[in-house]
Amino acid sequence: MKISKVSAVYFSATYTTQKIVRWVAQEFKPSFKEYDVTRKKLGEDIFMDSDELLIVGMPVYAGRIPQLAVESLKRFKGNDTPVVLLAVYGNRDYDDALLEMKELMESHFFKVVAAGAFIARHSIFTKLASTRPDAQDHEMIQKLVHKCTHLLDSVKSATLLPQIQVKGNKPYKPYGRFPIFPSADETCNRCGKCARLCPVGAIPKDAPQLTDPNKCISCGRCLVICPQKSRAFRGELYEEKLAFFLKTFGERKEPELIFAE
C-alpha cells in the first residue's frame, strides 16, 4: 500500500518529543500535517482514511503518557489507518506508555504497524541523557521508517499485518506526581514567558517566580524556555533524587523498535 498523507500528533513540553516526531515524519514525507497538543486540546474530531499514516509521539511521565494528551488522542478517528507509536523517556523506563498508546489508538480503529521507545533528556533530572536524542538515535529513526515503509509496501492494507506486541502491564501504573516543583531565583526578570507557555497554567502571571504545586506536572517546560535560565528544580530532596537517578539510570540506553511482523 502507498501512503497518501502523513500526520503527526505529539505532546512535547521540552521539545524533545517534538524533535523525534518530526524526524520520523520527515523521513516518511517531507511535508506532513502537525498537531501539537501540549498546551491546547483538539476541539474537533480528526478523521483519517486507510491510505493515510498517523505518527503519535508522547513523553513518558512516571511510566504513563500525559493525562492532558489523552483527550486529544481520542479525537483521532481511524479507518484501518496505519499508525506509528513513539514513547520518549528520560533513560529510566517507558513502563506502560506504549501499551497505553497502542490500546487507545486501536480502540479508535488504527492499525499499529510499528512502535519505538526513544530516549531524550530527562525533564526533571536534566543531567540524565542530557544530549539525547543524538545522531545515533536519528540513525535508529531511519531504520524504523525504512522497515515501516517495507512492511506497508508488502501489503494492500495495514489490516493484513499481524498484531504488534509491546511491553506493558494491565492495569497500567497509577498516575504519579513528582513532589518537587521548579521555581525561579533572583535572576528572574518577570518577563512572563514561562507563565504564558506553561501547559497547565501553574505559573502565576503576576508572580512568575512562583509555581502552583496543585497544578504543576513537573514537565520541565519552564526550565528550557526561560531566557534568564533562572527556573530550576532545587533543594536537598531534589539533589538526593538526582544522585540516585544518575547512579541507577546513568548508563546509556538504546532505542527499542517493534514491528508488526
Image (spheres, rainbow, N blue to C red):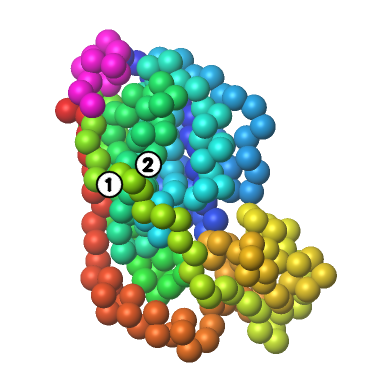
From this viewpoint, is residue 88 visible?
Answer: no
Tag 1, which secondary structure? Answer: loop
Q: Is residue 241 above or below residue 86?
A: below
Mark positioned earlier in the residue sequence (2 or 1): 2
State yes or no: residue 178 in magenta. no
The part of the image, by quadrant, that contains residue 175 is bottom left
Q: Which residue is mark 1?
A: 168
Residue drawn 67% across and 69% down?
A: 212
Q: Which contiguous range is marked in magenta?
A: 152-163
Q: Quadrant of the C terminus?
A: top left
Q: Nearer the viewer, residue 60 or 231?
A: 60
Residue drawn 49% across and 64% down?
A: 177
The residue most toward the top is: 156
Q: Is residue 68 above or below residue 157?
A: below
- Residue 188, position as x, y percentages in the image: 71, 79
Q: Does the residue at mark 2 contact the one at mark 1 (Cβ under 8 Å)?
A: yes
Residue drawn 35% across and 35% down?
A: 102
- Residue 24, position as x, y percentages in the image: 38, 40
The amino acid at mark 2 is Glu
Q: Nearer the viewer, residue 89 or 146?
A: 89
From this viewpoint, is residue 70 visible?
Answer: yes
The amino acid at mark 1 is Gly
Q: Which residue is mark 2?
A: 100
- The 10 Å Cα crowd at callout 1, few under 14, some 14 to 19, many 20 or more, is some
- Residue 172, position as x, y percentages in the image: 35, 48
The residue most toward the front is: 171
State yes or no: residue 161 in magenta. yes
- Residue 7, position as x, y percentages in the image: 49, 30
- The 10 Å Cα crowd at callout 2, few under 14, some 14 to 19, many 20 or more, is many
Q: Is residue 218 above or below residue 72?
A: below
